Image: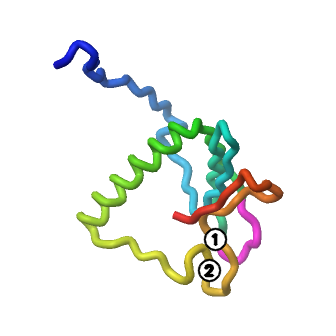
Amino acid sequence: MEKNQQQQQPIPIELDEKAAEGIYSNFVLTAHTASEFILDFARMVPGINKAKVFARIIMTPQSAKSLNVVLTGAIKQFEESFGAIQIAQQKGTRADGSPIGFQSLPGQGQEKKSSRG
């Protein structure tokens, strides 16, 4: 190993009981500024025209990019094991054409951008 390379040590992770329960989300709102990405994890219930945010994650652009890399790899492994993930309907819409999935936060300006995953 080169002098300049540091061997990565495992980072101990603490997972308390509440965090271990997890939070189900079927709807994510995204926004960003020059210095941060905001991910609002929400839940939508059929027949109710409202979503409730259960967790907000604020990340640096570098951490958001790292998350993208990790998720891309995880999805690739999932699809190799279980087959391609099918996304129904037109990208970002329900059968009735209304939006679902990744959306920009309401009232956000040009700095904000939406994408659907």
Residue 95 vs residue 14, the one in the foreground: 95
Q: Measuring from the top left, give residue 96's x and y in whole percent.
A: 67, 86
Q: Residue furthest top?
A: 3
Q: Which element is circle 1 on?
A: loop
x 66%, y 63%: residue: 103
- The reply to whether discs 2 and 1 touch (Cβ–Cβ < 8 Å) is yes
Q: CA distance from mark 2 to mark 1?
A: 6 Å
Q: Which element is circle 2 on?
A: loop
x 79%, y 55%: residue: 109
Please tell me which of labels 2 and 1 falls first in the chain: 2
Crowding around mark 1 (Cα neighbors within 10 Å: few <14, some 14 to 19, many 20+) is some
Q: Measuring from the top left, give residue 40's x and y in whole percent.
A: 66, 50
56 in the magenta segment: no
48 in the magenta segment: yes
Crowding around mark 2 (Cα neighbors within 10 Å: few <14, some 14 to 19, many 20+) is few
Relative to residue 75, is residue 65 drawn left or right? right
What residue does disc 1 label?
Answer: 100
Q: Residue furthest left?
A: 1
Q: Measuring from the top left, give residue 78's x and y in whole percent.
A: 31, 61
Residue 34 vs residue 55, the one in the foreground: 34
x 76%, y 72%: residue: 49
Quarter of the view holding residue 81: bottom left
In the rendering, which numbered label is found on residue 94? 2
Amino acid identity at mark 1: Ile
x 66%, y 69%: residue: 45
Q: How is the image coloured?
A: rainbow
Relative to residue 116, is residue 82 drawn left or right? left
Q: Main secondary structure of the magenta part?
A: loop
Task: Report the magenta residues as a range.
Answer: 46-51
